[in-house]
Image (cartoon, grey):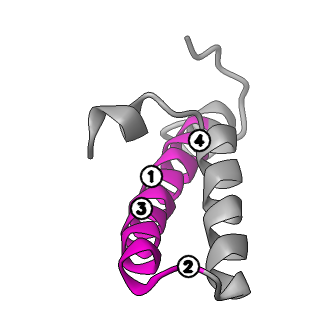
Amino acid sequence: MSDSLSSLSFEDALSELEKIVRGLEGGQQKLEDAIASYERGAALRRHCETKLGEAEARVQAIVERADGTLAMQKLD
């Protein structure tokens, strides 16, 4: 993943992805620009999926202890 993507928050990446989708749906881009936008969008989607997975793991660690009982743990 490129440095420019790795520094993006989930919200910023999602916002950029939404703009790309709107641009592609508009159908007004030149072919090469549309392909570049699609590639960027695919990378942003992967980045968002990674961020969601990390958040899911953090939430899971908060609510589930090794023995399966519910507990609240502080995560830094």
- Residue at x 47% of width, y 81% of height: 30
Crowdedness near tag 2: few (<14), some (14–19) or many (≥20) residues, C-alpha within 10 Å: few
Q: What residue did someone put label 1 on?
A: 47
Front one among 13 and 26: 26
Q: What residue did someone put label 4 on?
A: 55
Q: What residue did someone put label 3 on?
A: 40
Label located before the other in sequence (3 or 1): 3
Seen in the picture, residue 52 relative to 19 is either above or below; the reply is: above
Crowdedness near tag 4: few (<14), some (14–19) or many (≥20) residues, C-alpha within 10 Å: few
The quarter of the displayed image where residue 35 is located: bottom left
- Residue at x 51% of width, y 34% of height: 8
Question: Cα distance, mark 1 to mark 2?
Answer: 24 Å
Question: Cα distance, mark 3 to mark 2?
Answer: 14 Å
Front one among 23 and 75: 23
Q: Secondary structure at mark 2?
A: loop
Q: Is residue 1 magenta?
A: no
Q: Is residue 31 magenta?
A: yes
Name the amino acid type tagged 1.
Answer: His
Name the amino acid type tagged 4.
Answer: Ala
- Residue at x 58% of width, y 17% of height: 75
Label located before the other in sequence (1 or 2): 2
Q: What residue did someone put label 2 on?
A: 29
Crowdedness near tag 3: few (<14), some (14–19) or many (≥20) residues, C-alpha within 10 Å: some
From which residue to which does the magenta span run? 29-58
Label located before the other in sequence (3 or 4): 3
Q: Is residue 29 left or right of residue 46?
A: right
Q: Position of residue 53 (x, y in %)?
A: 50, 52
Label located before the other in sequence (2 or 4): 2
Crowdedness near tag 1: few (<14), some (14–19) or many (≥20) residues, C-alpha within 10 Å: many
Name the amino acid type tagged 3.
Answer: Arg
